Amino acid sequence: MKITTARRLTQIFFFTLFVWLCLAATVGPLWWQWRGWPIAWFLQLDPLVALGTVLTTHSFHPSLAWALVTIGLTILFGRVFCGFVCPFGALHQFVSWLGRLGGRPKDKMAANTYRPAQVIKYYVLLALLAAAAGNLLLTLVRASRDSTWIALVVAAVAVLALFWLTLRKVIASFRRAVLFGALLVLVWFGAAALLSVERLTLATLQIGWLDPIPLVYRSFNLVVLPATDLAVEKWFPSGRFYTGVGLIGALFVALVLLNLVVPRFFCRILCPLGALLGVIGRGTLWSIGKTGAKCTECALCDVDCEGACNPMGPIRVSECLMCMNCLDNCPSVRPIAYLPRPSSGGEISASGVTRRGFVATLIAGAAAVPLARLDGSTKSDWSPSLIRPPGSVAEEEFLARCLKCGECMRVCPTNVLQPSGFAHGWESVWTPVLNNRIGTSGCQLNCIACGHACPTAAIRPLTLDEKQGAGDFTEHGPVRIGLAYVDRGRCLPWAMERPCIVCEENCPVTPKAIYVSEIESTVRDGTFAIASIDGATVRVSGTPLTPGRFASGDYTCKLPDETRSRRIVANTADSLTLDTAPTAEEPPPPGALLEVQVRLQRPVIDPARCIGCGVCEHECPMTGLRAIRVTADNETRSANRSILLKGSR
Amino acid sequence: MIPPHQSPLDPAANRREFLRRGLQAGAAVALTGGLASLLWNRHPPGDFNREAASALLPDFSDKNAGPKMAIVTGQNRTAMVRRALEAMGGISRFIKRGDRVMLKVNAAFATPAILSATTHPELAAELVRLCLGAGAASVLVTDNPINDPESCFNLTGIGPAVRAAGAELVLPRAAQFAPGTLPGARLIRDWPILHEPFRGITKLIGVAPVKQHNRAGASMTMKNWYGLLGGRRNQFHQDINGIIVELAMLVRPTFVVLDGTASMMANGPTGGSLADLKPTQTLVVSTDGIAADAFGATLLDKTFRDLPYIAGATERGLGTADFASLNPVRAAV
């Protein structure tokens, strides 16, 4: 079998596996649903996910250990992940191939020549990592404040790194270079001592915008599969809706279609993961290269080159996607091969990143976070409608972990988990938020799927006991994601004197977090003059009644001199039939007034019980703007948002 | 379409050419006018008071002679329902060979069976087995629950249990609802009713637990038919008794099973704690759902007078609130 055939089969296998894992990320008892399948496996394989979360959280989440395999493979064999494994890469390769079917070799060669724009991906990587690294900087500053030893080590490393990276190249004199280095270290410690570093060094994990694995997961979970389900109607009986799929889908479609302009546009020019693997695989043990055997320089190896790494000339090892097309195309006796030694045709290892570009991108990436947070969205202007799924960690930590991969939104059985738009700040774009108007129910009491689907523990994997505050967690109480409040200006029994309490009925907490306050309220034009009383039937005079209007069981009649109202069971145009006959010794005199009242149960929230699940909001019959709504107030994950006094019950 | 002039001074544009082009132009104009007249519609869109073709459910009620009600006490639901049906004359009195049976369970909430907020899966499965044993060609199980349908059927255990017993589970889809107008009704007018799965159905069984319900007083076999409504049915809570009576008019089941093995005394209809339940250890089978619910009220320490919809249904001749008058067969297992 040819190596390229093996590569294609491998790509088809991994792409199919990826689609299958997306499909399997649903809760249910059927064989194809989530039976412990490693649904987030491709995310776990992604070293950028691992590196990004290590930078933001300073810890290595065990589920991401698969990334070490990818790193190891890349060090040994080059970017085989890009060429053989990446499902997004496979899609790009397929579309690029489709778009150039029957094309002339000359045009293909032109399209597959290295472009200076391929450097962009390294800047994308740098900016995303710099935005994620703020916390690390803070930790270093703090540590060097606390311990002289650490301070000295940091200083030494900084001087050496600076010297090695740049100073020896810009400053000719060794003495001046050392002086300059020392000056920089002084600036570092001066800044640490004088500036309020805590507010300048913030971190956010934004790799999900362009990291291909979260991007392709998100696109399939939220756009491709729901769109397919419109046709097959197999996976979700009630369909799937995601707010703002337009933008998610447009990005996905645009990136796929750009392959028609430049083959593997995304892989070559934008992919930050490709850039990272390019850096890791710079000195790869095995690589594509010329053997030194006689080469006619026919340039056929350049014709179908996926990475545009120019295998014929000095090859750009970091750009090589390991598509192996060059080996397949070469008509001669092995002048080009996959070898454990450098190419005899020369290698270009430079990525094209300039020193100034490097520094400027790092500073821009790191500065973007504190600048963005000047909007106060993580402080006092936090968004009350940003209701995070149960188990979510506190907001800043959440933003340091969430990949925007959409796994939680895919697995959520009720479809209540939605990708956030720009309304909650740009850092939150495509992170999960509850929208109780969408889906089949609010957040279900007996469900913990999202936390178990999350690959980075932005949503902690809760047990049912922890979520519900049962068993060992009784003292902690249930996990609250928000608090419902009644809009008394819209609520039927509060504002419009009509019975309802659908919210109370559906409150899943026990005892219910919604209870009712009962009143009997005289209806509009509900005072009538009594004509006569005969047993349980009261005749009234005046305006005729609508027959049956008060017969629904919700209306009562308050007779003069009686403290208790009696239920009306029937009414004609001029009489009311009560469920029991008045017992008064003397019937009220003709002309005395009675009142027809409606028995109203009005919903009231108990904040000590409400968990913010939103089932009430979902069920409220005021479907436009619900009369009962949930906000993120009182959520367990942020101590500073609690409503109740400590110790109150 | 009309080919362009080659040139205004083209000598080839003679009379014949002019006629040919004129005919083409005329045909194009006629075609446009024809299409317009074909699509001509002087009526503005939408008629807010439209009442579409009405989708109603057939009368499934049992016409055979025999007891109308059986009350069995005990703890084992499967044994109780078997005993009750025996007392009614056996399942074969109701289900004949070749019948296609619909079993309407209460699967409203995604809660475990032990909390008794939903029909117990063992009871539903036993009914499926009994029907299939009596020769039913097929048994369908459905409900349009409040929480997520799939989660409801899975978490309550009803889905797996009835599937294992040989029934087909129908998860409601929007396309399966059709608007229906119930004659003489005030509320069920042009309202979506779960209709499509009833195609070819010859028998209908309702099976529901006994639950306290703050708005309706109690939720038993009559309230259970709420699950056949689609649309924004929650607004019917403005007239809960009215809608339950109309549902009793709409749905005429073969028989109903009211499961009071454990009755939800408080915090209904969702429950959520074993503390909400009371072991009332009773199961009722009746061809008269109103009588069954009137009896069920006693399990909740109420009477039918506390439930205005029972009086409403009685007035309309849909059944009797005086269950004792049916001389229910009583047994214990």
Image (tube, rainbow, N blue to C red):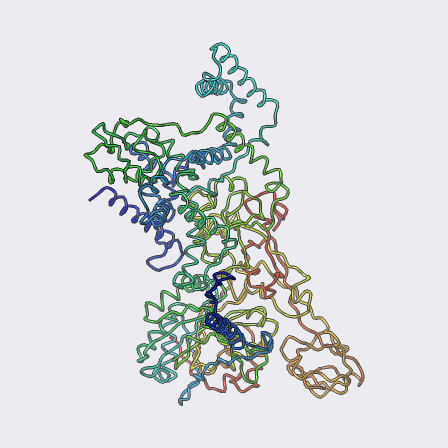
Q: Position of residue A624 (x, y in %)?
A: 61, 63
Q: Is residue A43 above or below residue B89?
A: above
Q: Position of residue A555 (x, y in %)?
A: 67, 76
Foreground: A139 or A565? A139
- How many numbered discs, if any? 0
Q: Is residue B254 above or below residue B26?
A: below
Is A352 displayed left or right of A1 in the figure? right
The answer to whether any part of residue A216 appears in the image is: yes
Q: Position of residue A93 (x, y in %)?
A: 34, 45
Foreground: A623 or A279? A279
Q: Residue furthest front?
A: B11
Residue at the image point whose x is 38% and y is 31% from the top: A279
Query: Looking at the rendering, in which quadrant would you find the N terminus of chain A?
Result: top left
Q: Residue furthest bottom?
A: B65
Residue at the image point whose x is 42% and y is 65% from the top: B153
Foreground: B291 or A334? A334
Is A163 displayed left or right of A368 in the figure? left
Foreground: A514 or B150? B150
Q: Position of residue A16 (x, y in %)?
A: 32, 51
The answer to whether any part of residue B220 appears in the image is: no
